[in-house]
Amino acid sequence: MAENTNFIHEIIDGEIESGKYRADEIHTRFPPEPNGYLHIGHCKALMIDFGTAEKYGGRCNLRMDDTNPAKEDTEYVDAIKEDIHWLGFDWGDRFYYGSDYFAETYRLACELIKTGDAYVCELSPDQFSEYRGDLSHPAISPYRDRPWQESLDLFERMKAGEFPEGKYTLRAKIDLASGNFNMRDPVLYRIRYIEHHRQGTEWCIFPMYDFAHPIQDCLEGITHSLCSLEYEIHRPLYDWVRDHVAPFLHMEVMPRQIEFARLNLTYTVMSKRYLRRLVEDRLVDGWDDPRMPTLCGMRRRGYTAAAIKDFLGRVGVAKTDSMADIELLEHCVREDLGTSSPRRVAVVRPVKVVIDNFPEGKTEYFELPNNPSDPEAGTRKVPFTRELYIEEDDFTLTPPPKFFRLKPDGEVRLMGAYIVKYVCVDTDDDGNVSAIHCTADLETGCGMPADGRKVKGTIHWVSAQYAHNADVVYYDKLFTEPNMNDVPSDKYDEYLNTSSAVTYKGCKLEPSIADDPDGVHYQFVRLGYFIRDTKLPNTYNRIVSLKDSFKAK
């Protein structure tokens, strides 16, 4: 399926055509905060940043936005790098931290003070809110006309740690009557006494994102600063900072901010704060829980990088918000796995079958295809013995109409092997079926009956003697509400899907699986796509079911 249109590429194509840039001069950056794991929403931004640079033969920097020191952690830095590499992108030698630029950002702030474009303000947080004004009244700051020499002295003393938190801020001098409240002399620096994960206690003043971000883009030679739509209202401030620091830098390009609609996905919450709470409250099995929208969670569940990239390509890049269907993502996973995944047999809810006329102690081997759609994938030998396991749902004593699996007075094909006919059942003390006795038409093998009779049903099976015992987890959507954006954040827990992870113990898998390496994606015939879990021993995760309910619009 072709990708949807990408308005950002259309803009860049026009700039290249006009001679503003050569294609290989396109330079983007991906600036995640290292305070959590990347999720599918971040992945859209990542794909846009790295994908745009890749399309034009340009460059994309990886910059950790650690200007806010409160929650950064090297654990997250390493995880972000792993996720980007897993998706097939690389930043080369262009890995940076926002904190690398603290000294230069401070220098530029001092220059703005000297030119009268910034001042130290003494309003408390409460006063700042009180004097913010509204659309009919401008904001107020009694310190706006403070002499630049006094502001510079106070700013230097702020850096030296002479004042408590909240005593002073550095503000830009722009327009207190602006209809865009981000332009009403926004705060550029604040005092924070907190240890930074890389800078330690060297700094006690920290730049605000809206000030640091355009400066970092300027210093790195970024041509296109691509960000999500909520930053559109911040763009005038981005441009103001860029234009006012430019005289103090040797800049070859002036970065341009372009905003795109963020990804919204059905049955999904993207709030990093809420996802962190799920982890901390142990409502999920860590950031990599296979139900989480994190990339590490999707990787653990068995989603492929190719499927995720295909999905985001189909969603496209637009300027208006929309809701993507999680079933499209699952459809992309099925498309990717359907042609490449080896077929294996697993019985998740086993019931024993005894073939009464098959010799005890005998093992016969049947050849089953590894992938029916790919003859070059070859075949494998599967052992057949007197005692087998089939799925509990593939047998009933009281069959409904058009039930073509195993039933009294009925015949069914054991996939790739014999046709068997029901004889009787053994039951336990509670009346539950403990074993099903059948006879096999030993002349059929994997062929048709000699008398030409037709058998409609085919079911899968595993030898009881050779079965590999394992646990299997069926995963489903983490939330029950399609549009979680309509749910207040304090109500999210009420919509958690209590059936989003169902574990089946004592499942019976064909023996060849036990010797396979980790990371193999399987199609368990008639059940879905599966992968061995990377944390839980001898456990297989259902990635997606076989049934595809997605309908293209």
Image (cartoon, rainbow, N blue to C red):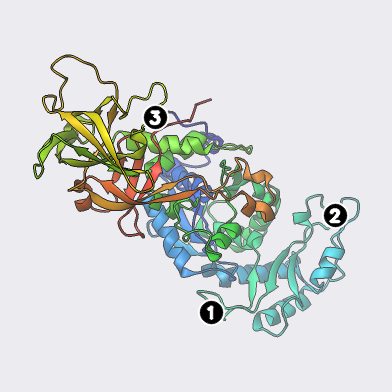
Confirm whether residue 182 shows in the render. yes
Which numbered marker is on residue 177? Answer: 2
Q: Position of residue 366 (x, y in %)?
A: 13, 35
Q: Position of residue 237 (x, y in %)?
A: 70, 54
Q: Nearer the viewer, mark 1 or mark 2?
A: 1
Residue sitting nearer the eye, 29 or 365: 365
Confirm whether residue 35 shows in the render. no
Q: Residues within 10 Å of mark 1 (few under 14, many from 20)?
A: few
Q: Label 1 to label 2, Cα distance in Å?
A: 39 Å
Left or right side of 365 for 133: right
Mark 2 / mark 3, whichever is N-terminal: 2
Label 2 element class:
loop
Q: If the image is split into quadrants, where does the N terminus sit?
A: top left
Q: Position of residue 30 (x, y in %)?
A: 50, 54
The three-letter code of the residue at mark 2 reads: Ala
Residue sitting nearer the eye, 326 or 385: 385
Q: Label 3 to label 1, Cα distance in Å?
A: 72 Å
Which numbered marker is on residue 200? Answer: 1
Label 1 element class:
loop
Label 3 element class:
loop
Mark 3 / mark 1, whichever is N-terminal: 1
Left or right side of 447 for 229: right
Where is mark 3, residue-wise?
Answer: 398
Left or right side of 232 for 198: left
Mark 1 / mark 2, whichever is N-terminal: 2
Q: Nearer the viewer, mark 3 or mark 1?
A: 3
Q: Is residue 453 above or below residue 370?
A: above
